[in-house]
Amino acid sequence: MADHGVGLAGVVDECRDDVTIEPVQFHALCIPPGQAGARRGARGRLGAVPISEGIRKMSTASFPEGFVWGVSTSAFQIEGATSSDGRGPSIWDGFSADRAEACDHYHRYPEDVRLMKDLGMAAYRFSVSWARVFPDGHGKPNAAGLDFYDRLLDELAGAGITPYATLYHWDLPQALEDRGGWPSRDTAHHFADYAAAVHDRLGDRVDTWFTLNEPWVAAFLGYGSGVHAPGRKSAGDAFRSAHHMLLAHGLSVQALRSAGAAKVGAVLNISPVMTPAQVSDFDRPLSEEDAEAVARIDALANRQFLEPMLRGAYPAELLPLIERHGGLDHIQDGDLDVIAQPLDLLGVNYYTPLVVQAQPSEPADLTWPGSEGILFCTIPTAVTAMGWPIVPNCLSLLLGRISREYPDLDLMVTENGADFVDVVTGDGIHDVDRISFVEEHLRALRTAIENGARVRGYLVWTLLDNLEWADGYQRKFGLVHVDFATQRRRPKDSAFWYRDVIRRNGLTETRPKRPTLETVAARTGVSRATVSRVVNGESSVSPEVRAAVMRAVNELGYVPNLAARSLVTRRTNAIALVLSVPRQGGDTLTAAVVQYVTSLLEGAGKQITLMLADTAESHRRIVAHVEARLVDGVVLLPPDRADTLAERLSRTGAPVVLLGKPAIASLVPYVDVDNAGGASAATEHLLSRGRRRIGMVCGPTDLVTVQDRLAGHRAALQRAGLRPHLALADDLSRASGASAARRLLADDPSPDAVFAATDQLAIGVLQAARELGKRVPSDLAVVGFDDVDAASATTPALTTVRVPVADQALALARLLLSRLEGGHTTSVVLPARLVIRESS
């Protein structure tokens, strides 16, 4: 195949004027390890790259001799060429909004292999596209599709890189989905045939095979919540899919071993499950209720796959959940014996923990069928751009647990990495956050190995920025930046840093003190401002001075940070968080948004200035502060009613984002929930329960949220051929809700249901119903909106529409960060979710 680009050395020359900048390490969140477990494992011996059988005593920062370093990718995310050489469609081809040319790896694999070689990779985990090998999912293999993997393996062999092949990374052939997909047992048998065919062609060059990648994601996001392909929403289908993927794993292990495969394993996404308090104290004792919540989610997320594979049985507490949602007929006699084939290696993918706590009346999350009474928590800590909490020592925790429960099983960290906002500059891509993330996880990994975990290698996710499934091209996980318009590859600082980790087979013993602008200036004999201009690519500096500065940068391993670049860009790294008062009923939302937005933006290196906008003078002072460029951007929590502050701030030229749709139509982007959609869903729920005389208790109709919720309620009634019956409340208090409800319930005929614009109004409706002798829900169904804490504690518990507070905060932070980097300015409207409780 023709060569489509230059290798790593050429990229460095082009981007950095023959200078390789050596990044340094930074400190991230660290938490002390703890916790336990014990039992037998499968047989274990990894040999794709020679590895000493025992863990040798290491120096302070080194890894065991023969430790395997590399990267992981997946076919759909990088290959492109979705209709080339006979490839059939996969379930993702139609589901993904972005077209899947991805990284065009299908044509550019020689360049990508050369990148890996130049970065010192010893191992490359890739996945085979089932639809490329079997366009119809079964039948006769497509020789042209297998030819591509032939060429790739030859290229890897020439570069001295050991391949690790994954047979399934979520891209089921669409033809098989049309025949039932993973809920159909036949798909498991087709998968075994596919595995045998791939081994028949490629087995002479692949030593280690992984059957499945993260079956929990494929089953429960693809068939349960529907946020991944194929987009089905059925708890029963999710559980059936999970079992048939496990069966496919067992059948394919048998097929591979019969064909002579040297080593076979599987890859699971495993997350420690803990309460918020345990995040900072792993050994924190749990209440009985929290312990049950943790155990149930651990069974759904982790043990549902670990125990059938490695013990030949499902967790006892999981079977009733499976039976309730999908029955047990799909689990046939002998299945678990097939599933529990001995494994040589378990791949562990780790990104973040699952944080939960017991919460009575909490409905089940679609992604987690059987999770009633459990709240999934957001914790205020450093996060990635995906909003995933960064807790490195949870990696030590989970590796230690697996090694104690399955002591004979070899492990490999097959995915670990992070999405961060990368900034392309004239002198490179200085992704210090990614370097910090990987370094801290490697330190946690070393701790696990020192404590006896049998971990044989570490593969970063991922080599290239790529097509990140349903999120498209906006996510940046790669060590190498890809310009998708030109397919140009540019290694980030993290790629060079990881290269050096591989060279020394470990980390530096201590985190070196970070060189500063002053350090470089002193070495070069120029001013701090001159150094800043050089590292920012300014043309006003003479070539001689530029060369001297870059020599010092290279010798010192200096990485320009945001503060350094601000000398030229005028960035302050300060963000104004402006609170307007009063916000009716918004205290809880405001407090949560302040907490989460502050945490997220500080995690992105920003300093937060909290400002109160409660008077005309405070408005003037805030506008002057922003006009003076004392902050880079503004997060504004505007008042409920019309206010001109947002427009005045937008005229300053600084990026501004709002919480909530503004009362006055504006071009300023905002983040809000789908108030109309949530009210429509609440009303349709009442209609589905046979209620036909549905009243609504409104708050003041000059409030934007009330206007939108009223519009959604009216639209749902209109579709059902019904007219609205409204009672206006003076404000959003319980007393006003009770007063409005008394008027509404005095009508003849009396309503058989009431939708209230907020939970506080709805609690007032419950109070009025009791006073009037109305039984809830038999005489009167009641639904609120917001899901405040008190909603689950009313008698009866209140059905309501949940406002995703943490998601709003995350979206606000992301929207502002995107604006700061010149990205999109589209407003974000988040879905609201109906929470059904006893009141309806």
Image (cartoon, rainbow, N blue to C red):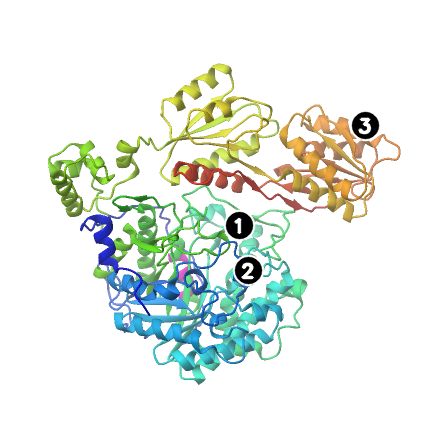
Apparent side of residue 497 relative to residue 634 in the rendered image (left or right): left
Magenta stretch contains residue 784: no
Q: Which residue is mark 2?
A: 94
Hey, which residue is sitting farthest right in the picture? 748
Q: Callout 1, which amino acid? A: Val
Inter-mark Cα distance, 2 to 1? 34 Å
Q: Which mark is residue 743?
A: 3
Q: Residue at 56% across / 63% down in the picture?
A: 219
- Label 3 sits on a secondary structure element that is helix
| Residue 752 left/right relative to 650 | right
Pick the front one: 242 or 143: 143
Question: Residue 107: which quarter of the image?
Answer: bottom left
> Of the residues tagged 1 and 3, which is closer to the observer?
3
Q: CA distance from mark 3 to mark 2?
A: 52 Å
Instruction: Label 1: state its secondary structure.
Output: strand
Which one is earlier in the sequence, the residue at label 2 or at label 1? 2
